[in-house]
Image (cartoon, rainbow, N blue to C red):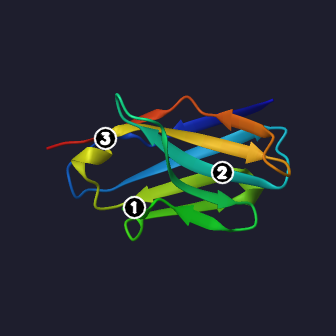
């Protein structure tokens, strides 16, 4: 079993910044990829950014240049630095880890609310 604990959400004004953290515990396998997804009410859950334990990174086009994902493998922790936030990015942000060749093991955090509003 794997547990993911997120922190760092909250209320921020448009143009502001937030930093999300997610710590994974339990039986962490390699290779793995840790990522952040978000889901607004009525919308599908979408990928924001992800990073493998080898350091390969992918971003959604909408966040390139504004968001930065990073991780500390020794701590099984992933971070998402979000700058220049927009109101339309208000959503629940979920941490995810996929493990094993072909990603057969897939776990989600409970989610953290990010609200961008003045």
Viewer-side residue, 90 vs 26:
90
Mark found first going from the N terminus, 3 or 2? 2
Q: Left or right: where does residue 85 sit relative to residue 80? A: left
Q: Which quadrant holds the C terminus?
A: top left
Q: Position of residue 97 (x, y in %)?
A: 69, 44
Q: CA distance from mark 3 to mark 2?
A: 21 Å
Element under disc 3: loop
Q: Residue furthest bottom?
A: 65
Q: Badge 2: few (under 14), some or many (20 or more) residues near its Cα, within 10 Å?
A: many
Which residue does the numbered mark 3 point to in the structure image? 90
Badge count: 3
| Depicted 83 relative to depicted 117: above or below | below
Which residue does the numbered mark 2 point to in the structure image? 34
| Depicted 77 relative to depicted 95: above or below | below
Marks 3/2 in contact by CB < 8 Å: the verdict is no
Q: Which quadrant holds the N terminus?
A: top right
Q: Badge 3: few (under 14), some or many (20 or more) residues near its Cα, within 10 Å?
A: many
Place residue 15 in its image quadrant. bottom left
Q: Left or right: where does residue 62 sit relative to residue 75? A: left
Element under disc 1: helix
Mark found first going from the N terminus, 3 or 1? 1
Q: Position of residue 61 (x, y in %)?
A: 42, 63
Which residue does the numbered mark 1 point to in the structure image? 63
Q: Badge 1: few (under 14), some or many (20 or more) residues near its Cα, within 10 Å?
A: some
């Amino acid at each position: 079993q794997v547990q993911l604990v997120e922190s760092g959400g909250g209320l921020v004004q448009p143009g502001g910044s937030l930093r999300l953290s997610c710590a994974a515990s339990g039986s962490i396998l390699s290779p793995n990829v840790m990522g952040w997804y978000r889901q607004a009410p009525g919308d599908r859950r979408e990928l924001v950014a992800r990073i493998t334990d080898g350091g390969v990174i992918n971003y959604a086009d909408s966040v390139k240049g504004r968001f930065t994902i990073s991780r500390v493998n020794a701590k099984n922790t992933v971070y998402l630095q979000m700058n220049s936030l927009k109101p339309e990015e208000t959503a629940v942000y979920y941490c995810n880890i996929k493990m094993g060749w072909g990603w057969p093991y897939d776990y989600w955090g409970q989610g953290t609310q990010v609200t961008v509003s003045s």
